[in-house]
Image (cartoon, rainbow, N blue to C red):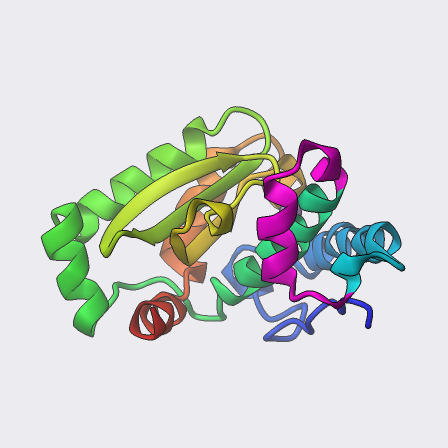
């Protein structure tokens, strides 16, 4: 059974008033993300990986340098779906409830989390991702290069931001810090992170 690209959790124009254009979704979801899924299906066709879950494919291929192409496309297929869900129309604001309490105890408060996240996202040299994860029960902000994600590290991803240039070039050109700031101000979906924490 082939892997499928999950539908967007909102209309492709829904984030346009909040700093991410329909044009970006046309390319980022419609071309880049779609290509990772198509490439993955081509690479695992008629192999034992074709019937595994996407998470299993990521874990198995991460350990095998001969499967680097499969890892890159599987992880990018997963990461993008997770990224779309890390945003919502009228996002931003501050976390509440258990997530807010855990940010206070593990990371020293929401302002410190935002600074760490901005630094991780801005200092990932070249392509990659910034993440809020649960690592051995504690919240942590990390960055990963290229397709890499927290799944093979046995960390639980709670939230992510794509900092590949293709994620922001249409709307922000070279200004990655403005894209990161807008994500935190207008797009980030703390309810998604809270649900991931509750399920962990
Ligand atoms: Mn991307």
In the rendered image, the residue lying farthest to the top is: 125
Task: Give percent across and percent down for residue 101.
Answer: 13, 64
Does residue 186 sit above or below 11 in this rendering? Answer: above
Verify whether residue 56 appears in magenta: yes
The magenta stretch spans which residues?
A: 51-69
Q: Considering depth in this image, is 134 or 108 the residue closer to the camera?
A: 134
Residue shown at 51% from the left, 41% from the top: 129
Task: Give percent across and percent down for residue 176.
Answer: 51, 35
In the rendered image, the residue lying farthest to the front is: 48
Residue shown at 49% from the left, 49% from the top: 161
Does residue 167 sit above or below 165 in this rendering? Answer: below
Number of numbered markers: 0
Among the 4 quarters of the image, the one containing residue 165: top right
Which part of the image, by quadrant, shows the N terminus? bottom right
Does residue 36 sit above or below 199 in this rendering? Answer: above
Residue shown at 25% from the left, 66% from the top: 95
Image position of 141 (left or right of 3): left
Task: Give percent across and percent down for residue 97.
Answer: 18, 74
Residue shown at 51% from the left, 24% from the top: 125
Which part of the image, by quadrant, shows the C terminus? bottom left
Among the 4 quarters of the image, the one containing residue 70: top right
Verify whether residue 145 appears in magenta: no
Q: Considering depth in this image, is 77 or 7 the residue closer to the camera?
A: 77
SS assignment for the magenta stretch, majority:
helix
Task: Give percent across and percent down for residue 87.
Answer: 48, 63
């Amino acid at each position: 059974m082939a892997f499928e690209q999950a539908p967007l959790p909102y209309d492709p124009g829904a984030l346009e008033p909040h700093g991410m254009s329909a044009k970006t979704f046309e390319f980022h979801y419609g071309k880049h993300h779609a290509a990772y899924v198509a490439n993955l299906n081509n690479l695992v066709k008629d192999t034992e990986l074709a019937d595994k879950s996407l998470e299993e494919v990521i874990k198995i291929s991460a350990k095998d340098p001969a499967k680097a192409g499969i890892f890159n496309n599987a992880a990018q297929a997963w990461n993008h779906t997770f990224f779309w869900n890390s945003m919502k129309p009228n996002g931003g604001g501050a976390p509440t409830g258990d997530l807010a309490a855990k940010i206070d105890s593990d990371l020293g408060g929401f302002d410190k989390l935002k600074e760490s996240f901005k630094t991780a996202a801005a200092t990932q040299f070249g392509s990659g991702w910034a993440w809020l994860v649960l690592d051995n029960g504690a919240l942590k902000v990390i960055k990963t290069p290229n397709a890499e994600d927290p799944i093979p590290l046995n960390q639980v991803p709670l939230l992510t931001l794509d900092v590949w240039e293709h994620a922001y070039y249409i709307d922000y050109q070279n200004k990655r810090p403005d894209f990161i700031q807008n994500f935190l101000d207008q797009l980030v979906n703390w309810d998604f992170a809270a649900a991931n924490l509750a399920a962990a």
